Image: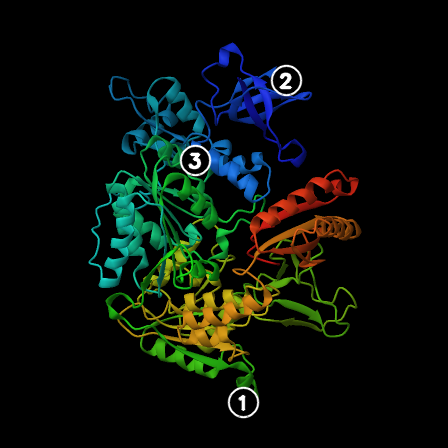
């Protein structure tokens, strides 16, 4: 039987199985899921063994050159997922495999720490003859378990001094698992006990546990208002899965933005938890994968890509804030973690819990009595606390009454009241920087990014930045077009709000939370911890402040401009706005004192605003579903977006036109919208055109797109442009 190998080249023309002979010295070592090196043309490339079978007649087989790992790289569940992803998202199988196995492909074993030999029979270095060696020796005695670099830094010597001690046998290497759960507190063992549940929480846990006991595949939608205790339902369901010998996985939109969740899991489950997110180093991620593969960890807590964790026996998969667009991967393969999790549950017989205060329309439609999901409701906050009272301020009226500022008089008064009562305030604006637009008042020139079709944002560092490609340049004092000194800095970002607050409330402590202030290291956690401990009165930030914050001192939330996301050229704009307003409003009144929310808007009568004001998800759902039904958008249809990019605008437009003609010629009952320039028509130097396909069945989309791509890949033009396939797109930008 020949080995069926997929070569690790993400090209559609080689996206097929190639057959190789297993040489005698590799027999028994090459298995399904192994990563191997194979001859391919005139070179050797990596490949993945996806099966064994008879080679087609007349095929001259070459030998596999080498095996690259001990044991299979992929578990059976992971290999099944890769095959499904390739078919579902129309991506090369090699690309799907690389996405799943990425931590093992790019990582390396965890760093080794150096400790003294246990015998203690070696003579210490002489501090007079070898002062540096003696210093490193003393540091190792006083601080055992430090890494090579840490020990050298502690002793004030170079790492080569530590290496010399190892070579002499004075220190030995001991491999140690990543210690993320220790940090400052020391190792935790999961000693925190669960709190008493209310009736609604108990009912939710009972239904989930019943499904676990029956080992039935079930999907629950946990629809709970903000502060209703969804996290505790997750934790007790996970504990039940572990008690029954199953593993558990919990996905959150962005692990780095939810330090409280990490702390809760550390205290409840200790070192059983494997943490997977983008801010881990490659070594740390590799180490966590190995702890999962070895069975030392049985609970996964992570962001989108954690859905690919190597669990052998998953029993429960939880997706918190299941509506979040960050669960969608915006690079090929463009998978959605929720969709992948549902497929994984089908392979393993796991129970899935989707949780949100504002479920996606697609999920709620599956749980509203017509679909296969079971709906669980948490209708009130823990401890009987009321939801915050929400007020809407019409910024048009504010302007008519002589206040052109970014903060309405009502919001200013409410902030002053909270400061007087020593309570805390969160202000939300989903725009970072100071001014979002710089324009010349003389000639009308708008300063744009040279690589992207987007305006540059002015920052207080006196730099103009592109928030898509990171281009930045010093802000000019004169117009680059006409030399005029009359440059206008328009629009509002978080930095401008921060300055306005300092002017209005000079006595207040103010912190800003956006990707500029919290983009590196532990800055995010330091900002949140400082605010939670009362070191600041006001926190102003982007959507970072809308997620995962449970700070009892916050009694006022102000939304500076609710319209920022409402009129984006995307059919989900109203849904995104309602979700974001509801989520950020939920940060208020989570302690003993009642909360208030003030939403500033130029469109106070839009149903996304009024339903968020009334905490009325069902009313929003009914109105938005009526719009979607009229327009034929999900959940009443399936979509696929094809994005054509390239450095030449003419070739990109031509390629998009050819794709559209190829699809329309198939007459497969698929509606084609476009082609047209994408809303962001140029990014990072590449022009962008797109077309959107609609169909009543997703299989029809895959069939017509697959046929069109196969036809177009033979054309010379498609060597100049790139086509990205986005099945079930979450953004049209």
Q: Where is residue 685 in the image (x, y as percent from the top left)?
A: 71, 51
Residue 57, disc? 2
Along the polypeptide, which appears first: circle 3 or circle 2? 2
Residue 173, disc? none
Along the polypeptide, which appears first: circle 1 or circle 3? 3
Within-10-Å neighbours for mark 3: few <14, some 14–19, many 20+: some
Q: In which quarter of the image is residue 547?
A: bottom left
In the rendered view, would you say 653 is above or below 538? Answer: above
**Disc 1 target residue:** 401
User: Is 455 placed left or right of 321 in the picture?
Assistant: right
In the rendered view, would you say 498 is above or below 56? Answer: below
Give the Cα separation between the discs numbered 3 and 2: 31 Å
Judging depth in this view, the residue of 497 and 114 nearest the camera is 497
**Disc 3 target residue:** 77
Q: Residue at x 65, y 15 (%)?
A: 60
Within-10-Å neighbours for mark 2: few <14, some 14–19, many 20+: few
């Amino acid at each position: 039987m020949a080995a069926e190998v997929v070569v690790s080249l993400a090209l559609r023309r080689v996206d097929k199985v190639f057959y190789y002979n297993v040489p005698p010295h590799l027999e028994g070592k090459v298995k399904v899921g192994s990563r191997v090196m194979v001859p391919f043309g005139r070179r050797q490339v990596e490949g993945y063994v996806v099966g064994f079978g008879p080679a087609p007649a007349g095929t001259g087989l070459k030998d596999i050159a080498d095996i690259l790992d001990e044991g299979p790289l992929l578990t059976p569940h992971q290999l099944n997922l890769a095959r499904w992803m390739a078919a579902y998202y129309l991506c090369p199988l090699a690309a799907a495999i690389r996405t799943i196995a990425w931590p093992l492909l790019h990582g390396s074993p965890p760093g080794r720490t150096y400790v003294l030999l246990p015998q203690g029979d070696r003579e210490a270095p002489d501090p007079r003859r070898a002062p540096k060696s003696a210093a490193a020796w003393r540091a190792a005695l006083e601080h055992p378990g430090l890494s090579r670099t840490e020990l050298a830094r502690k002793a004030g010597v170079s790492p080569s001094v530590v290496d010399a001690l190892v070579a002499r046998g004075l220190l030995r290497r001991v491999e140690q698992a990543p210690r993320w759960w220790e940090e400052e507190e020391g190792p935790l063992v999961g000693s925190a006990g669960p709190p008493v549940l209310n009736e609604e929480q108990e009912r939710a846990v009972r239904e989930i546990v019943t499904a676990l006991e029956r080992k039935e595949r079930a999907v629950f939608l946990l629809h709970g208002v903000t502060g209703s205790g969804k996290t505790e339902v997750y934790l007790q369901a996970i504990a039940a899965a572990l008690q029954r010998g199953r593993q558990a996985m919990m996905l959150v939109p962005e692990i780095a933005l939810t330090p409280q969740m990490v702390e809760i899991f550390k205290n409840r489950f200790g070192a059983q938890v494997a943490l997977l997110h983008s801010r881990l180093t490659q070594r740390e991620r590799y180490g966590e994968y190995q702890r999962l593969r070895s069975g030392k960890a049985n609970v996964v807590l992570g962001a989108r890509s954690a859905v690919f964790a190597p669990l052998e026996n998953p029993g429960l998969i939880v997706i918190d804030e299941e509506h979040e667009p960050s669960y969608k991967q915006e690079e090929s393969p463009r998978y959605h973690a929720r969709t992948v999790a549902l497929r994984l549950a089908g392979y393993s017989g796991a129970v899935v819990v989707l949780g949100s205060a504002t479920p996606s329309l697609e999920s709620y439609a599956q749980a509203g009595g017509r679909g296969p999901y079971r709906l669980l409701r948490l209708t009130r906050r823990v401890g009987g606390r009321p939801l915050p009272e929400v007020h809407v301020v019409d910024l048009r009226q504010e302007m008519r009454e002589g206040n052109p500022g970014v903060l309405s008089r009502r919001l200013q008064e409410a902030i002053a009241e909270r400061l007087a009562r020593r309570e805390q305030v969160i202000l939300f604006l989903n725009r970072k920087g100071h001014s979002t637009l710089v324009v010349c008042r003389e000639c009308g020139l708008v300063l744009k990014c040279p690589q992207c079709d987007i305006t540059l944002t002015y920052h207080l560092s006196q730099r103009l930045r592109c928030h898509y490609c990171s281009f930045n340049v010093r802000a000019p004092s004169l117009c680059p077009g006409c030399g005029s000194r009359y440059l206008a800095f328009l629009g509002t970002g978080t930095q401008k709000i921060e300055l306005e607050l300092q002017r209005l409330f000079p006595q207040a402590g103010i912190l800003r939370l956006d990707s500029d202030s919290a983009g590196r290291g532990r800055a995010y956690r330091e900002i949140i911890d400082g605010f939670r401990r009362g070191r600041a009165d006001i926190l102003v930030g982007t959507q970072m402040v809308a997620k995962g914050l449970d700070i009892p001192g916050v009694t006022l939330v102000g939304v500076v401009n609710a319209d920022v996301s409402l009129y984006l050229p995307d059919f989900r704009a109203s849904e995104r706005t309602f979700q974001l307003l509801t989520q950020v409003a939920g940060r208020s009144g989570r302690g003993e004192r009642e909360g208030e929310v003030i939403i500033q808007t130029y469109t106070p009568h839009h149903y996304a605003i009024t339903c968020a004001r009334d905490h009325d998800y069902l009313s929003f759902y009914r109105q938005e579903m009526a719009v979607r039904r009229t327009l034929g958008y999900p959940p009443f249809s399936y979509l696929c977006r094809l994005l054509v990019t390239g450095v030449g605008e003419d070739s990109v437009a031509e390629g998009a036109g050819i794709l559209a003609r190829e699809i329309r010629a198939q007459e497969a009952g698929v509606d084609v919208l476009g082609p047209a320039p994408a809303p962001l028509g140029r990014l990072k130097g590449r022009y962008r055109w797109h077309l959107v396909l609609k169909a009543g069945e997703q299989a029809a989309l895959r069939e017509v797109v697959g046929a069109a791509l196969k036809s177009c890949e033979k054309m010379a033009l498609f060597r100049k442009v790139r086509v990205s396939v986005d099945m079930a797109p979450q953004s049209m930008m």
